[in-house]
Amino acid sequence: MSVVVDEPAVTDGGGTSRRRRGRALTAVALVLVFAVFPLVMSPFANLQVTLILVYAVAILGLDILVGWTGQVSLGQSAFFGIGAYGVAAGAVHGWPVWAGLLLGTAVAGVVGCLVAIPAARLRGYALGMITLTLPVVAVPLAKRMEVVTGGAQGLNVTIVQAPGWTGLAADQWRYYVVGIGAAIVFALAAALRRGRFGRAFDAIRVNEALATAQGVHVTRYKVLAFTLSSVYGGVAGVLYVVAVQFISPETLVLTLSISMLAGLAIGGLRSLLGCVLGAAFYVVVPNLTGSVSAGQSYLLYGVCLLVVMLLMPRGVAPALGHAVRRVANRRERAAASGE
Amino acid sequence: MSTLELRGVHAGYGKAQVLHDVSLHVGDGSITTLLGANGAGKTTTLRAISGLVRSTGEILIDGRPIPSAPDAVARLGVAHVPQGRGTIGQLSVDDNLKAGALLRRDRVQARADLRRLRELFPVLGERAQSQAAGLSGGEQQMLAIARALMGRPSILLLDEPSLGLAPLITKELFVLLPRLRDEWGLTVLVVEQNADLALSVGDHAVVLESGRVVLTGTAREISGHDEVRRAYLGN
Amino acid sequence: MNLLQQVLDGLSSGSVYATLALALVLVHRSTGIVNFAQGQMAVISTYVAWTLYDAGVPVWGAIGAAIVLSLVVGALVERFLIRRFEGGEPLAAIVVTVGLLISVNGLVSLIWGTVLKQFPSAFPSGGVGSGSGGTIGYGTLGTIGALLVVVLALNWLFRHTRLGLAFRAVAANPESSALLGLPVGRLLMLGWGLAAAVGALAGCLVAPKLYLAPEMMDSVLTYALAAAVLGGLNSALGTVLAAWFIGVVENLAGTYVSFVGGDMKIAVPLVLMVLILLLKPEGVFGHKEVRRV
């Protein structure tokens, strides 16, 4: 006979407050590490972390759509491109960065909303196919609109220079700017997820008919989710240009959309940490596999992706959370039996 | 015909244990009724037998333990007509019936069986080319039973055949049951909410409560049992 | 180049898209998954055919051997990789096929390198008709014919054999089918195996028109996905018609509408697909299997 033992839930008040204190300490430590990191690491490492944060924002946007409301999109790279071209083209014409930021994210949001209004009626693969059209059309379009986009060569810009008084190098300053930008949009998403919107999105994902019965305006929230997701894609594009000072049509190809989707699955749905881990996988693993063997880099990257999915079908973040909970529970049980 | 025996069977879904130490015996060629309240574990018992739910303990057919995979259990001659009938809506009535006989080698006999079932259930012949999803509830139940018989099973597991059917149709089905048993050489284990009806055609009965066997006996004994009358027969 | 020729060329490309789209439909019907690696699996099959041809095997023999090998490999992929993701989170299944795509692409580059290779046509050069009517190449006609053969063969398999009935039953309702004693797992393997075999044919049909390269099927996959979704991911007839439509529209728009040109011609069928999907979300043939009373 197999006896099933439930894992004990949170055991006592003392344990919870101890846990909360631990969590606060961890957060402070993380912020410190994050702040000191660029001062001691190489410019290359700084750029890597900056890029991880850039892609984490884009993947978070995808999570709003895929993880929160259960829709699928292959169009995120197009919104990424809109944001990037918005800020880059603005900079070329002498606009300040904040104007480019507004332009890029606004256009991304408007396009996202326009696509979402008719597409919200669609489900699953039909929606996926519609969004697949976006990058397929966006790439040749970006090549053609030479006046705005610089054509196939793309745009080189010089924005977000480190002010003299800081004494920081360009890569360090951009690291902080992107880091703070990412922190703001992550905090916004976290607040949104906890509030009324998050509950409505959950209801739609779990059971659309039931959500309607509970008075959730399903179509409106789906359009909202898609628009938000595109805005996050646009913000990520802006941050990308801040990080690398360059954008070309090759950046927005469908492959990037697919990689972001893969990053989301690797990190785990509905998890802020998961978005960062997924982005880290996308940025770091190709570097690692490339350093092992340039010829086999692509094969190794694919195999890594498969292995992670086979070992953790629900993503790295949930698997980590599960492991941490198990260790904590075991420790508490040991403490309880020892006392 | 075969005997079916459960010895100390435990089964459940995930962490929820549903069956606790269930033992029962279904005699060769008998019709045995499984009674009990909602959630007593009747359906889980059938699903454990046909391998849809993992179980521990012994499940024996003619004294031999059954395999664990559902398709392997079915190939041993156990036909399970699940709750909600399990007909394949997208396929035509005929294709459903033929799917029931896919594993048979004796194709000539299978064709004869198909003709016989169309005599027994004329609607299946009349609507041979209709999609199964378009049939009424009663017709689907007939299709599900006929499809099970197409596999020439020795044991038939029926899960709440009356669910969603008009009382008259339910009655017709149950009256047919002993006849099918004799003609097709079946041992029948049937789960039924309508205890009166089930006991009227059954030979034996087993009463489950919270996943445990609390009473077994002949149909007559059980239907005469005061407590059972109060609990399941409504008087 | 006259109109008839353009239409036939479009039908020919459309037939290649249709063949790969049929593979997508086979996989989706059996396991409910859209296989992003379908095109890449076809690429490696085509390289195998090329290797055999290069070693002196006649072209039809090489293609046939690659198809049979793909059948086996496709079945093994379902059994040992995909099975663990069936019925789980759909995103995980999609991403696993993406991982497969990347891995196979890497494997192809590793084994055969990235230098383009010339793949022989299975059909004779030249064509029928001449003079003002232009010439219609045997390759064009052969590609369309090959698709028709595939469609007829699949139709025969699914409608008129016991194996086909078993496959349809499992695709529609795996649990019910298991209760009838059907070996569900092996039939799902068959679905993936057949898909890989059909995909291999698509690769061998398109390779002579392009050059054999690791990325050869990328755009074909995009068209095939569009055709499969337009066809409702379920109906063979709908998929073929959608693929032909895509092939013809793309070819005509690329040739006759100067604004479209070579770079944007991929967008035309996709944008049309978007419009059609918005009008009919379930796909043009999504509800083909109606009740026949």
Image (tube, coloured by chain):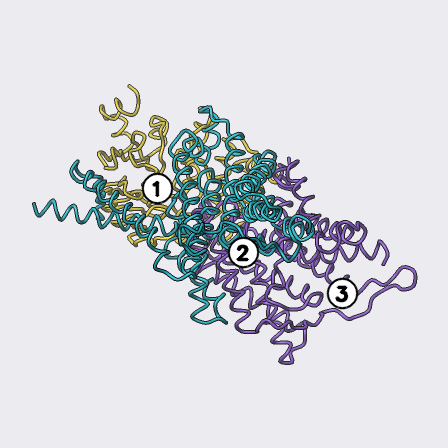
Chain colours: A cyan, B yellow, C purple
**Residue placed most toward the observer, A194 or A268:** A194
Quadrant of the rendered image containing residue A248: bottom right
Q: Residue at x 68, y 58 (%)?
A: C16
How many angstroms separate mark 3 from mark 1 (CA)?
Answer: 58 Å
Q: Residue at x 68, y 64 (%)?
A: C205
Q: Nearer the viewer, mark 1 or mark 2?
A: 2
Q: Determine the chain carrying the residue at label 3.
A: C
Q: Nearer the viewer, mark 3 or mark 1?
A: 3
Q: Is residue C161 visible?
A: no
What residue sits right under mark 1 in the picture?
B46
Q: Is residue C80 visible?
A: yes
- Characterize the local packing of mark 3: few (<14), some (14-19) or many (20 or more) Cα atoms within 10 angstroms: many
Amino acid type, mark 1: Leu
What residue sits right under mark 3 in the picture?
C139
Q: Determine the chain carrying the residue at label 1.
A: B
- Characterize the local packing of mark 2: few (<14), some (14-19) or many (20 or more) Cα atoms within 10 angstroms: many
Q: Determine the chain carrying the residue at label 2.
A: C
- Whether tag 3 and tag 1 are in contact, CB under 8 A, the answer is no
**Residue placed most toward the observer, A29 or A4:** A29
In this picture, residue C113 sits left or right of residue B168: right
**Percent position (x, y) of residue C160?**
62, 53
What residue sits right under mark 2 in the picture?
C191
SS at circle 1: helix
In this picture, residue B28 sits left or right of residue A239: left
**Percent position (x, y) of residue A204?**
46, 33
SS at circle 3: helix
